[in-house]
Amino acid sequence: MSPVEIGEVAALGVLAGMLAGIFGVGGGGIFVPALTLVLGLAQLEAEATSLLAIVPVAILGSWRNHQEGGVRWRDALIMGLASIATAVLGTWLADLSPDRVLRIGFAVLLVITAVRMTLHTRSLQRMRRGEE
């Protein structure tokens, strides 16, 4: 890895850490696009790298949010345990999928998430104004 690539990877880590702290987003929404677009990694490599890279961010962010009383431990434990088996299945399916399919699927997931969050935010704003 060249010094420039090391700098790019470190910059991605700084950006992801800041965004994770502010918005609670994990590496997927930040790391994966950056690793594919900036560093030219294949989608599967970017996803696998992102999963490992986000572990320290998730631990530190969770600890900090716990101090403020913002972690619902029971929900987190249930989701974490339930996701173990499906994560294994998901990685198996990702291994079998062509890079193009993974990229398109990831992009569609991001768009659907963005649309849902926007609609939900608008709905909450209307409810607060007493429109619905």
Image (spheres, rainbow, N blue to C red):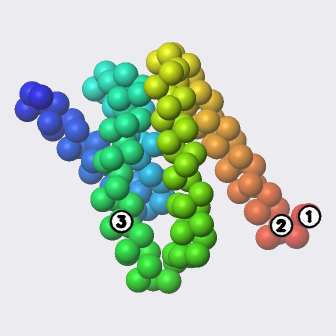
In depth, the one of 59 and 34 nearer the eye is: 59
Q: Could you tell whether 103 is left or right of 14 in the image?
A: right
The amino acid marked with disc number 3 is: Ile
User: Which SS class for mark 2?
Assistant: helix
* 3 or 1: tag closer to the N-terminus: 3
Q: Nearer the viewer, mark 3 or mark 1?
A: 3
C-alpha span from label 3 to label 2: 34 Å
Q: Nearer the viewer, mark 3 or mark 2?
A: 3
The amino acid marked with disc number 1 is: Glu
The amino acid marked with disc number 2 is: Met
Label 3, residues with CA under 10 Å away: few <14, some 14-19, many ≥20: few
User: Which SS class for mark 1?
Assistant: loop
Q: Could you tell whether 71 is left or right of 109 in the image?
A: left
Mark carried by residue 132 = 1
**Pointer 3: what residue?**
59
* 1 or 2: tag closer to the N-terminus: 2
Q: Could you tell whether 121 is left or right of 63 in the image?
A: right
Q: In what quadrant of the picture does the C terminus appear?
A: bottom right
Residue 38 visible in the picture: yes
Q: Residue at x 41, y 28 (%)?
A: 44
C-alpha span from label 1 to label 2: 5 Å
Mark carried by residue 127 = 2
Residue 34 lies in what quarter of the image?
Answer: top left
